[in-house]
Image (spheres, rainbow, N blue to C red):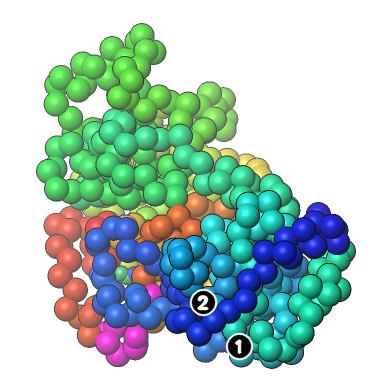
Amino acid sequence: MATTSNETVSVLPSITSNNSSPPQQISRANGATIISIPTASADAIASFSWGNYLKETNAHGAPAPLQDMWGQLTPGMKVEVINTDCSYNLNDPKEKIFWFAYIVRVEGYLALLRYEGCDDDSSMDFWCNLCNKDVHCVGWCGQHGVKLAPPRSIEHRQTDWKTFLVNKLVGAKTLPDSFRPKIQSSLRCPFKKYMLLEVIDKFQVAHMCVGKISEVIGGRLRINYENKPGEHFWVHHTSELIHPVGWSYAVGHKIEATDEYENEAMKINETNSYPAYIATPDLFRNVPVNLPDDEQFKEGQKLEAVDPLEMSRICPATVGKVLKNGYFMLSIDGSSAEDGSDWFCYHSSSRLIFPINFCKTNKIPLSPPLGYQGEFEWEKYLLETNSVYAPQELFQIIKEKTINPFTVGMKIEAVDMMAPHLVCVAAIAKVADNLIRVRFDGWGDDFEQWVDCQSMNIYPIGWCELVGYKLEPPRQTEQENTELVKQRPWKKSSTRKTNKRKRLT
Ligand code: MLZ
């Protein structure tokens, strides 16, 4: 929407003059500390700023998903934003004063802004989250009776600000009206605190547990384990690792639960009626359940898969037990425990399983089974193991080709899937078909993770600030990092063979 001169002029009478009181401060730092599970020092968190970091690393952020819709989010677009270089109103120190600014650059949800009147002077440029409640379309201050005043440092540059602004603002583009509602709806989450559901057991991934939602932030759920006091697990609400009450019973998955729970789950399955405290199936990720037989994976079939417990590797894997509704258990060849305790449940529509030779076709390394002698070739391996491969047509990534919008080097905020309470500063290290390889800044290769480009565990920069989640800044040095890996106090998984990060934390 272009602003008109009328709209603009109508806000001008409230332009106020500065005096010499101290400048008003707003927090532009990322990572409001909402939860208390930090691994980074408080100093590092407080001092991390995406703006400075992009400059230091000469990097760009991956575009925010809604950016296409916001065609207007281009350099030059005007906004009204809080003025951090102005006096307090002495009668009301809490009153916010605004000024006009325009976008110099957009990175994720963040924009580099320059106040009107600074001209070519970039010294006052500042980064701001476009979804911040102190950024509005031009005309907003006028409509809401909020004062506008030029920054003190440039106040002397114009004698007639009104005419200056009319010239600058007439016909200029400003934020679309629908901007904030669109963001809000993209963050909407149907789950509520205290709802009951089934969640993967982070200590034994072949099992499910009963969990209760204890917090919802930015569509991410903190789920407390009912059978493990003090233990919890964070997932996105569309995650494949959570299911409605009764799911385990319905598909034949193992669940650790009381007899009382199992009885209730069975009853719910039969009657399809859910008490209010139980999350209903319609809230969960929707997957096709009635797959015809020829679209089902079969026990013993081989494929390639991201190792769910060491996500830096893509490995040969085998379909284990086939469950109902398109689900099956998968074991990673050479790594998984023979007793099946670390087999991972996948749905046939998963985008993290691939037909054999996927890695070869995409020129990315396939990690042979641990201990495998000689060069790994599928043809040879199938003969050696007397097995068959899963046909290409079964795989979602073949059925539904998607555009991977990422390029190497783009910065993002990404969940560490091995410690999913952490959302960290990260970058795209590789792109292959539907996959991206996420590298956590300052952390070594072992921490890298292959994730789907549509994953809900990666976010544009500025997401943490937007939803109020703590952002883990880059680890300071690689050396410090190596020391940390050496000392890492992970509990050893008794059955899984030799992987480095063996369990979810
Ligand atoms: N201390 C935990 C968390 C590491 C977090 C790394 N995130 C990129 C560990 O060592 O697993």
Closest to the observer, 500 or 414: 414
Circle 2 SS class: loop
User: Residue at 21% across / 21% down in the picture?
Assistant: 262
Asked if the stretch drawn in magenta spans residue 61, the answer is no
- Which residue is denoted by mark 1 in the rendering? 153
Which label's residue is closer to the chain start, 1 or 2? 2
Ligand 1 within 8 Å of disc 2? The answer is no
The three-letter amino acid code for the residue at tag 2 is Ser
The answer to whether residue 175 is left or right of residue 198 is right
Q: Quadrant of residue 31?
A: bottom left
User: Residue at 51% across / 77% down in the picture?
Assistant: 87
Asked if the stretch drawn in magenta spans residue 474, the answer is yes
Please state the extent of the stretch shown in magenta in the rendering.
473-482
The answer to whether residue 204 is left or right of residue 49 is left
Q: Quadrant of residue 425?
A: bottom left
Q: Is residue 364 above or below residue 64?
A: below
User: Residue at 55% across / 61% down in the picture?
Assistant: 134
- Which residue is denoted by mark 2 in the rendering? 87
Where is residue 393 shown, x and y percent of the image? 62, 42
